[in-house]
Each structure stands twice: as structure tokens, then as C-alpha cells.
Amino acid sequence: MKRRRWILAGVSGLALLVPFVTPPGADAQCALGVPVIRVGVQGSSSGAHADYGRQIQMGATMAVEEINAAGGVLGCKLEMKFVDEELKPASAVKNARYLVTEWGAHFLVGVDSSGSAMAIGPVLPELKRIHFFTHAATHRLTEELVAQKGIQEIVRVSVPVYQESLAAWVFKDRPEIKRFATIGADYEYGYSTWNLFKETMKKFRPDAEFVAAAWAPFWTMDFSPHIAAVMAQKPDAIIATPWAGEAVMLLRQALLQGVFDKIQVWFQGMGGSVDVLEGITREVQQDKFKGKLWATARYIHNWPDTPENKAFNERFDKRWGRLPNYSAETTYSAIYIAKAAVEKAKSLETPKVLEALKGMQIQTPAGLRVFREEDHQFVYNVPAGRVVWDPKYPIAVLGDLKVVPAKDYYRYPPFTPVAATK
Amino acid sequence: MDTILFQGLIGLSLAMYLWLLSAGLTIIFGVLGVLNFAHGSLFMVGAYLAYTFYGMLELPFWLATLLSLLGVALLGLVMEWGFLRRIYDLDHAYQLLLTFGFILILDDAVKLIWGGVFKIPPIPPFLEGAWPVAGRLFPVYNVFLIAVGLAVAVGLWLLFERTWWGRTVRATASDREMANAIGVNVPRVFSGVFMVGAALAALGGALGTPVRVVAPGIGAAMIIQAFIITVIGGLGNLKGAFVSSLLVGVLSAYGTLFFPVFELFFIFVIMAVVLLVRPQGLFAR
């Protein structure tokens, strides 16, 4: 009897000691010596561009949930924190510092605005953290900050602005389209897209004329003057770069001016994003764009036609009740890339993880992504397509897909400067 | 020539929209002496209410607009009666802080109620289509904006110049103590004026919904333009706000056509030039 009491007392005492022996929150199986791996995520989650940040958050959450359910990374669970970058570089840098120095992020992911990306980039060596950029598209991030200045902590998982020059491949075999105009976002993305498009187009079509350009700053609500100004030059095609809610407004206001009766093609950069397609579905169903609206995005949910992509879409729809847009997929894939690199490096130390990224090729919902060592850009294919209505989907989709291999529209080191001016 | 005429008309519709935004702001400053930073937020709430009534509950567009005006007028009453009237006698800095606080509260409130993602209401059928003007198609929606802007200008002129209430408001604006001494219920006049100003902001928001998106933050984007217009016209001067709206709207449209490289700065260039020539604004006494 006495002996049993001693055993009970001993077991109880040991049980009481357990919380002091095991660090709070630590997983006994984690091989990396940390309680959890922290992933700090940023995106724009308020205003006309809020859906992109929301999609970044959804993509990251889903990746973290899946990885944790499957046992984590080398036995370590992931923990995620999302913050709003507000499309403001100062906020983005402040957030990055907070996420690393106060919250303890091991990796940074996301960022919608190119301005924010360019501001965060130079801070990363000081923070000693890798930032997987999953939307910001400025070519300067990888060309200037990585290839030229050597900031190793920058890694981009999404397609840079090169992809917008896909428009040149859409138009190159259509000699009847000769006069091009742009309604551009009035910042670097708009300027470099137009300049890259002109540069690429001139190679295919020396006869192309670039007849008008109108520039609309962030938060433009009324595009009527811009539309009227470029239409005054009677263009055959318009290349447009306002995105998210602004793209929806622009397209609806262009319809009111009867633009689609006058032009032959409208190419909307990032118009293949789910939020834009949702916003214009009503008009697409009514064939108001007359089959003249083309678009691309950095991932298109209905391409590639692979079991992996279909399964990703189904899981995303089941989890969130929506289709994934490109920032959701790029962020989701970025977290899986981080997982693969940590598993290869068997370490969370930045230099070792960077070393592990070298030579990496990884299958993702968007297809095969290949790490390019010179500029830390993951290279992969994304097509452009015509905006169409397909009853198989709840929203308008891209059809008549034109798949140009990434090697044809990506720029290669050594990089020559692209004018990032009007 | 056709291009110039067409761009001018587009500029006119832009001007009338800016006028709707700035009229309420300038009335509130002219009578109450309050520089209402939250005017853009009232515009945003008006847009959200119109979206709710029209886009979600599918009420007729006009009824949705009217309900949105009434809703924001009530919100204006709460702001004036509950908060602003307590600080009329304090330094202007307190008004700025208080109204700026309302921007933060209303921005977060709409995020909580409607979410952070933009909303897209449908275009009412009567606002679709376009009329041929100068060899191009001029949208019916833009004609509608011009008509509403002019109607509001005439309506406000009649209200302030030809009605007893308008005379009372003007008397109160000129001399608050004298108006009080002759039996005018000054607090009630102030509440009424703030409600009219708030309803005008909501009208801008509601009429924008058919072709614009509704999103948190649109108020802050619009308030900058409204301030520029009120400053150019002369703070508190209704006629000034109308003329400066015309100036900014039409010149911005021509700026986009002829000087696209400077589009971003055009509105500021206009303001700088006017303020250099007449620092008190075009119509300030």
C-alpha cells in the first residue's frame, strides 16, 4: 500500500515537472532546435487592392495548415503572422523589422507593391532573413538588387514585369493591329511594362506605332479622361496596367465610352487575376467585350491542366469558397519552397538555406519552377489568354491560351537597363 | 476640334463630380467654421450604403441613393451633436484631430461591416449606353453626372438665397451671437447644415457606385481633391467651390490629353498657380 502511494506521488511529481523540462510550445520532434518556425507575411489588405493581400493571406494560411498537418518541416510546426503593408514602402519596412526583431520571423513572404519590395530589399541583409517575394513585379528587384548589388536574401517566386511583354506575342502575328496605346499605372510598373512591350514589339514588328500614353495614379476613380485621351489617337490596341479594383473600374468605364467597338484588342496586365475576373464576369457573360479583351496574371487558376493544379484549386475552394488568384498560389508555393530548402539545408540559418536553393527545381500548382542563381528568380511558364465565359467556372476565365515558354519572354543576365520612366 | 470638345465634356463631368464632393465640405466650413477632414469618410459611407441598398438588397437605384443620403445625414447629426459642438470654441487643431479620428474609426468600421475587399455594384440600365458627340460616344452616365451637378448647384443657390432657412443659415454664419440674440436656435441650424453637408458627400459616393468600386480608403483618396478645390475656390465659398471644380475638372482632362507626363501633378500645379496669384482663393472675400 505504502509502495503504491510512493509510486503515485512520484508520477505526480514528474508530471508537475514536465512543463519546466520542455520549453513552452516546443515540439519534441523538431529537429531545428526552435519551438516553431515563424513565417511573417505581408500584403495589402485594405482598399481597392485589398483582395491581393487577402489572397496572399489565404495562400499562406493554407500552406501552413497543410504542412503542419503533414508533420511540419523536419518535425517543426509553422506559425504565421499576416500584416497589412498598405501599399506604403515605409509601412512595409516597419512591418518587416517588427516581424523579424519583435515577433521572431525566420522567413518573410509576400508584399504586393513594387515600391514596398524595393524598400524592404536593402534592409534584408541587416535583418539576416530571406524574403520570398510573391507579387511585387518590378524587374529592378532581381536585376538591380540581387544581380548587381548582390543582396542574397531576396528570392522571387512570382513572374516579374517581363510577363506583361507577353502582349507582344499576342499581337505579333496580327499585322492589322498597328497602332498601340497605353493606359498605364502611373508608377514604375506602368512605365516599365510599356517600355518592355515597346522594346519587344519592335523586334517582331518594326511597323508598329506607339501613338498615345495616359497615366493614372493609384486611387484613380474616374478614368474617363484617360480613356478619351488615348482614344483620340485612334489606337488599334490598348495595353492597360491599372490592376485590381482599378482595372475593373477602367474596363467598365471603357465600355461606357464604346471603346470595344473601336479597337481590336485590349490587353489587361494582371487582368487574369481572380478579383478582376469576378468584377467583370457580368459584362463577359453579356459579351460586352466582344472577345477583344486579353489578359494575363502571374498564375492562372485554369492552367496548367495538371492533377496537381486541379487538386490545389479544389482544396483552395473547399477551404475558402473561392478560386485562388496568383498571389495566393505564389505565396502558397513560396512556403513550400522554403520548406524544401530548410529540409535540404537541415538548418534555418539564412546562408545555408540560400545555398540549398541553388539548383532547386520544384513542382508547384503553377508548374515547374526553376531557381535562377544569378538573380534569385524562380522561372516558370504562364500564358496569356482571351477573357471568356465558360459555364464550367463560376467566374469569367482566360481561354484561347497562348503559352509562350518563359525562356522566350524572360530577360537574362547580364541585364541591360529598362527605362522605368514615362 | 472634335477631340477638344469631347475631352472638354469629359472634363465637365469630372468637374461636376468634384463639385458634389467639395460642396458639402465648403458649406460646413463656411457656416460652422469646421474643416471636416472626415468629409471623405462620409462620402465613403454613402457609397457603401448605396451599394448595400442597391447592389445587395436590389432596391431601385433612386431609392437606394435616397436612403444612403438619409443614413449619412443621420451619421452627420451624430457627429455634430455628439462630438463637434463640444469643441467649437476650442482651437482649430482640436477639430482637425477629432475629424481625423473619425476617418480612422469610419475606415475600420466599414472594414468590419463590409470587409476589406472592394465591391462592384451593377450599372443601372438607365445609365448604360452612350450618345454620339463629336464623332465619338459620350456616356449617358457622364451626362447624368453633369445634370445632377448642375441641379445641385441650382438647388443649393435656391436653398441659401431664396428660403427662410437659407437666410437664417447665412445670418448665423455671419454673426453667431447676433443670430442667437434674435431668437435663432443656433445649435439646431448647425446640426441642419452639417446634415446637409454630409448628405452631399453621400450623394457623391452613391452616384459614383455604378461605375466605380467601393472600398475602404476611397474617402481618404477623395478628400485630397475636395480640399484642393475648396482651397482654390476660397474656403467656405460655395460659388468658389463650383468655379474651382470646373477649373480643376476641365483642366485636368485637358492635361491628360496634352501633357500626359504631368498628369499626376496637374491638379497641384493649378492650385499652386491660383494660390500664387490669389492666396486667399479665387472667391474669398
Image (cartoon, rainbow, N blue to C red):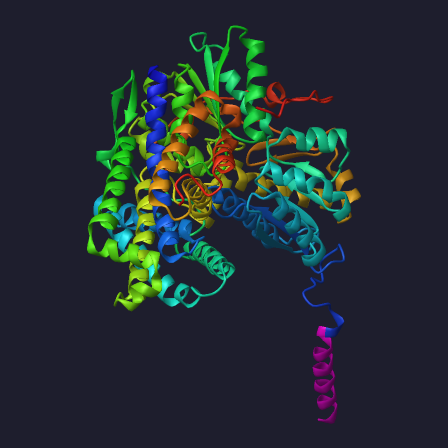
Q: Is residue B100 left or right of residue A225?
A: right
Instruction: Name the image quarter holding the C terminus of chain A.
Output: top right
Q: Is residue B150 left or right of residue A328?
A: left
Q: Position of residue A331 (x, y in %)?
A: 58, 42
Residue at the image position 42 percent from the left and 26 percent from the top: A226
Q: Is residue A243 left or right of residue A350?
A: left
Q: Position of residue B28 (x, y in %)?
A: 36, 53
Residue at the image position 58 percent from the left and 54 percent from the top: A69
* Front-lying residue, A339 or A70: A339
Q: Is residue B217 above or below residue A170?
A: below
Q: Is residue A142 left or right of residue A385?
A: right
Quarter occupied by residue B36: bottom left
Can the viewer see residue B26? yes
Quarter occupied by residue A261: top left
Residue B243 shown in magenta? no
Q: Is residue A217 above or below residue A16?
A: above
Residue A7 shown in magenta? yes
Q: Position of residue B181 (x, y in %)?
A: 29, 68
- Label count reads 0
Give the prevailing secondary structure in the magenta stretch: helix
The boundaries of the magenta stretch are A1-19
* Front-lying residue, A107 or A147: A147
